[in-house]
Amino acid sequence: MTVITDRTASTDAPVLDIVAERWSPRIYDGAAPINEEALRSALEAARWAPSAYNRQPWRFLVTRRGSSAHETVLNSLIDFNQGWAKDAGALIVIVTETVDAEGTPLPEARYDAGQAAAYFTIQAHANDLLVHQMSGFDPETVSQAFALDETLVPLTVIAVGVLGDATGVDDAVLSRENAPRTRRPLTESVLVND
């Protein structure tokens, strides 16, 4: 079975091509090195994401395949994610600050860090890096392994790399790769449009 690589979304309204074409693959080339220039650009785009009061409450743990840090992040993933994410050129953990310097809670920090992840994702895709964000990991394992301050919380792991060959890929992964891209209709997401 081959992987369907044209994953362009059928949208309810016109959107930028980069948005319609973005998808979250699970098959990475385990031999291809990460394109460092493209990775740096994606991190730079994330740096410029909007945030409340310009607090920029995000941090990144950038780990490259073959490093002990990558292995640590990989081991924090649930089994299914480990099976395919091991081949990603990099695993990046998005971390957010939960309080400011005075200890005041930052309730908007998770939202802001999510925007940084979104900016990262779109820029990476524009530079021919494929990205898959994951919630299936153990944040406590990451916090302990990287000695994160208790005010820093790992939110998501992002696999980054280039598309690999589907030969020998697990059937469950192939099935998910080739499943139709779907979203509920826009009319069901907009609660008020007055």
Image: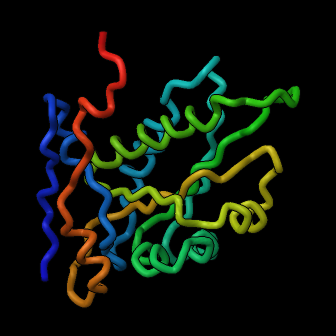
Residue plotted at (31% across, 80% down):
172
Residue plotted at (48% across, 60% down):
134
Residue plotted at (40% across, 77% down):
84
Name above or below for residue 40 compared with residue 166. Answer: above
Residue 90: % across, % down: 47, 64
Count the marks: how many?
Answer: 0
In the image, taking residue 56 as reference, residue 163 lies left or right, namely left
Is the C terminus in the top left, top right, bottom left or bottom right quadrant? Answer: top left
Q: Which quadrant of the figure has residue 69? A: bottom right
Residue plotted at (82% across, 50% down):
149
Q: Residue furthest right?
A: 102
Residue 112: % across, % down: 56, 32
Q: Which quadrant of the figure has residue 162? A: bottom left
Residue 47: % across, % down: 52, 34
Q: Residue furthest bottom?
A: 168
Name above or below for residue 174 compared with residue 123. Answer: below
In the image, taking residue 39 as reference, residue 164 lies left or right, namely left
The foreground one among 59 and 26 is: 26
Q: Residue furthest top?
A: 194
Is the N terminus in the top left, top right, bottom left or bottom right quadrant? Answer: bottom left
The foreground one among 112 and 176 is: 176
Residue 132: % across, % down: 39, 59
